[in-house]
Image (cartoon, rainbow, N blue to C red):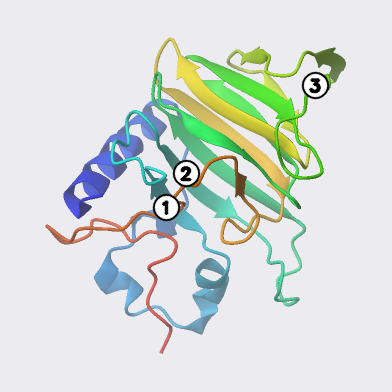
Amino acid sequence: MKRSELNKIMRDAVEFIDKMNFKLPPFAFWSPDEWAQKGHEYDEIRDNMLGWDITDFGSGDFFKVGLLMFTVRNGNFNDKKYIKPYAEKLLIVEEGQVTPYHFHWSKMEDIINRGGGDLLVKVYNSTEDEQFSDTDVDIFKDGCHFTVKAGSTVRIKPGESISIQQGMYHTFWAEGGKTLLGEVSKVNDDRVDNRFYEPTGRFPEIEEDEAPLYLLGNEYPEAH
């Protein structure tokens, strides 16, 4: 992805998030120069990859296959000084924009539709060899437990949510307009806890055609 594209996506996201009356933390808006001055007191942000996360999953077309995330808080699998057992993210899904099939070995998450359009989530259980299972899928949706056939699509309207269990393949997209999602989960580590059904690039290769507006969560400089 080009840096200019990332910068525009961030600007549009800030405008949309503000329109939806959600407030991002101050570090969302620190410039690269400001980050260069931040010491070890902000290591929790660096070590746990808080902040902006934008990916086209290697597709080359962000608005067709892609996702914007902002990690607000997170613990850490490997560093016990970070004791939070939970994480929180904000996600923006463009209408028709697909996040590819994947599951998590460790993370369980609730995905909450905070407003905009509807979220469509298609689900499968996984087999022991990490393929699609043909078994019925248990769905937990706003306190209601029911089952659906493998490959079913569950509609999540604004204000509704769905719990995604470990090992549950899921793909999702928005219908009816750009959609703001919340995610509340166990500790998140996208470097080691995503099993994509098809080979997929998780973090984008960036063509530096202009200066960064804000840094991504995997780009922070080391503290001095």
The x, y position of residue 222, in whole percent, is 42, 82
Residue 38 visible in image: yes
Q: Are marks 1 and 2 in contact (CB under 8 Å)?
A: yes
Q: Give the number of the disc on residue 69.
A: 2
Image quadrant where residue 152 sits: top right
The x, y position of residue 63, in whole percent, is 32, 30
> Upstream in the sequence, badge 1 or badge 2?
1
Q: Which residue is mark 3?
A: 139
Circle 2 Cα neighbour tier, 10 Å, few/some/many (<14 / 14–19 / ≥20): many
Q: Residue at x 43, y 9 (%)?
A: 176
Nearer the observer: mark 3 or 1; the answer is 3
* 143 displayed left or right of 74: right
215 is higher (above) or lower (below) than 186: below
Q: Which residue is mark 1?
A: 52
Give the distance between the C-alpha atoms of the residues marked 2 and 3, in whole angstroms: 24 Å
Nearer the observer: mark 2 or 3; the answer is 3
